[in-house]
Image: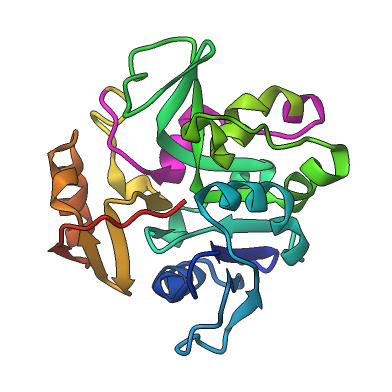
Amino acid sequence: MEHENLTIVSVYGHNDGASAIPSIQKSVRELPGSQGMLLSISKPENLPEDIVWHRIGFLDYMMYSVFIMHSLYAFIDTDYCLIVQDDSWVLNGANFKPEYYEYDYIGGVSHAAMVGNQLLLQGSWHDKFPRTLVQNGGFSLRSKRFLEAPNRLGIVHNHAQDIHLWNEDVQLSCLKRHTFAELGMKYASEKTIRDFSLENVIPTMHDDFDFGRLLGCHSTCRKLVSDTHILVNPICVTSHREPDFLSFLQSIGYTIEYVASNHTQA
């Protein structure tokens, strides 16, 4: 596939975003025709010429979510954008399915889901039904019309005391999903997002999952620092089937380095 109508973008409002360069470059190579873009408070000295850069103001963790909902649209000229970070990138562009462009929002399975009016975390929702999965925003595909909708149609970010409910992916894929759906926005199904990206390896959902089907991944436990080198926080290796996923990454050419870290990113 060619992806001329896709911008691969990373947003860093707390530093120059240099750490996201490997993820942007890797993702652009995996999705031929796409354009790489970095939005940050200053321009990295080592920014490749083929990555477009725009200056933005300072964003803390909570301001990041508001920016994604209400400002990102202004920088995107293509029909779609794919959000990546230094801990999220395209693993295998050959796994990009044409049907992904039929959706206005698609993000991978996250560790969180709404069950009734309660947000359950750390995969504790895996045996609960009915549920609405939080589609991970840190690696997510969004249409231009979806990016524009909050400002154009007056869908305002809800200020929430719970930091998890504040997050833009919770707001867009759960709390306001019904509103967007009524306006004709299309969300990917639970089955579809399982192949789109992986955050945590969730019991039941990923018990027999073939990691070779994944388009991408996103987790604060794994950070891409070069084209084939991943830093992994050892504390994460104890989670369900995470060692299997790391072995898979090694089997496709990545080297794994275990480094204790407090690395976090919105």
- Residue at left offset 74%, top offset 34%: 185
Residue nearest the observer in this picture, 31 or 24: 24
Query: Furthest-front residue in view?
Result: 161
125 in relation to 196, above or below: above
161 in relation to 83, above or below: above
Give yes or no for residue 197 being in the magenta stretch.
yes
232 horizontally vs 205: left or right: left
Residue nearest the observer in this picture, 108 or 97: 108
131 in relation to 25, above or below: above
Q: Quadrant of residue 201?
A: top left
- Residue at left offset 54%, top offset 13%: 117
Region rendered in magenta: 180-203
56 horizontally vs 257: left or right: right
Quarter of the image for the N terminus: give it.
bottom right
- Residue at left offset 44%, top offset 10%: 129
Q: Quadrant of residue 261?
A: bottom left
Total labels drawn: 0
Residue 38 shows in the view: no
181 in relation to 100, above or below: above
Residue 131 x, y percent position in the rendering: 49, 16
Colour convention: rainbow
Give yes or no for residue 191 being in the magenta stretch.
yes
